[in-house]
Amino acid sequence: MSHEEIHQDLRSAVRELCRSFPDAYWRDLDAKREYPAAFVKALTDAGYLAALIPEEFGGSGLGIAEASVILEEINRSGANAGACHAQMYTMGTLLRHGSDAQKREYLPKIASGELRLQAFGVSEPTTGSDTTQMKTMAVRKGDTYVVSGQQVWISRAEHSDLLLLVCRTTPLEQVKKRGEGLSILLVDLREAVGHGLTIRPIRTMMNHATTELFFDDLKVPASALVGEEGKGFRYLIDGLNAERILIAAECVGDGRWFIERASKYAKDRVVFGRPIGQNQGVQFPIARAHVNIEAADLMRIKAAALFDRGAACGAEANMAKLLAADASWEAANVAVQTYGGFGFAEDYDIERKFRETKLYQVAPISTNLILAYVAEHVLGLPRSY
Ligand SMILES: Cc1cc2nc3c(=O)[nH]c(=O)nc-3n(C[C@H](O)[C@H](O)[C@H](O)COP(=O)(O)OP(=O)(O)OC[C@H]3O[C@@H](n4cnc5c(N)ncnc54)[C@H](O)[C@@H]3O)c2cc1C
């Protein structure tokens, strides 16, 4: 089977699964700010969240191109892959840097759905995008780490069994280079909550199950260390390209959903005796948003192809994320404008997706930080921060 055929089959199968979770399902959860547990279970049972886990550990051993097709189709259907995407990219840290024992212990259970690895902890309230300055500290005492500190925006922590925690193991004052002294711990949330870890939900403008974490002398076995102590920042960087490509694909999915809805509405809605879509003032913005989504998709496809053959793809992965997030946000604005007043009505779902796709201007990395990366690392301009 060619790559094209594999992707086509995947698209049809994911679309079929998503049909059981229509707009009303997402609208209802959004109103209640509830986690889409049934949807995530259906995806897990069908094996989609284990797409990147190698076959020897019970996954399907697919590439990032295929994984990105899965997430794109989820968002393309009007759903929100933000409820489950982290399982795909956080698992990569364990796969690349975990010990054989850790991989044998966790990966098959993650693949089968027995364990959920949906939470990834980096962001702190007072550190912001400057990750190397992070303060959450893990101090080694015998065969345990004692963790103290605070993190914010840690999504899905209440719906995950494991947390991939980035924390400091050497105080900042003692490191020579700013990327040193960070480590990664695989924290078992089932044991941690109530024993040094408190999770406090944060209500946001969209339904995202995000939380604040308070570490108060949480004891984590030293065997939870992933890879070597002090190398956590490098491991983090290693996982970012996958994350950027997958999020770009979600944005492409969002964009296509907005354009399809806007086009249909523009054909059906008759005002002044003709469909509003007959007016160039209405059709051109939709056409332009389509052009931009298709262009962003090309960069996403290029980045995924480079990633899957093991080539450097930092520039392409970042550019794909920026282009796709901007294009989906443009498409979201165009859809609201096309729907007029109905764009604001919950029953039409446009305003829900509008709120959801806005996130990708800021997380997991903001557009400015991508531009700073391109300026410095691709164009050789002076470092700005
Ligand atoms: C809903 C949601 C879910 C999230 N989920 C997770 C998660 O699961 N795990 C996790 O670890 N984090 C998560 N995050 C955090 C997210 O990654 C951060 O919000 C993001 O990286 C930006 O960091 P900040 O919010 O601290 O913004 P800041 O770093 O404070 O930046 C604020 C603004 O200033 C700009 N800015 C900052 N510095 C510069 C500069 N040098 N040059 C130009 N512009 C600059 C930024 O672009 C941004 O627009 C989530 C965030 C949200 C909102």
Image (spheres, helix red, strand yellow):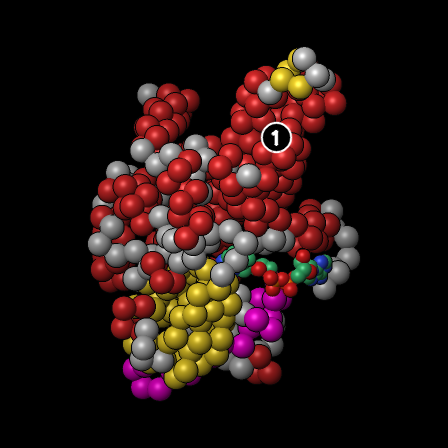
Q: Secondary structure at mark 1?
A: helix
Where is residue 209 drawn, in percent x and y? 43, 57
Quadrant of the snapshot with the C terminus: bottom right
Q: Is residue 69 at least partly visible in the picture? A: no
Q: Looking at the picture, does residue 317 appear above or below residue 66? A: below
* Quadrant assignment for ligand 1: bottom right
Q: Name the residue: 57% across, 18% down.
A: 268
Which residue is label 1 attached to? 339
Q: Position of residue 76 (x, y in %)?
A: 47, 32
Residue 214, how many percent across, how many down? 44, 76
Asked if 18 appears above or below 56 in the picture, the reply is above
Evaluate whether residue 128 shows in this view: yes
Residue 312: image location, x then y, percent = 55, 44
Q: Nearer the viewer, residue 341 or 143?
A: 341
- Asked which quadrant contains residue 9, the reply is top left
In this view, the residue farthest toward the front is 272
Query: What residue range appears in magenta?
Result: 125-146
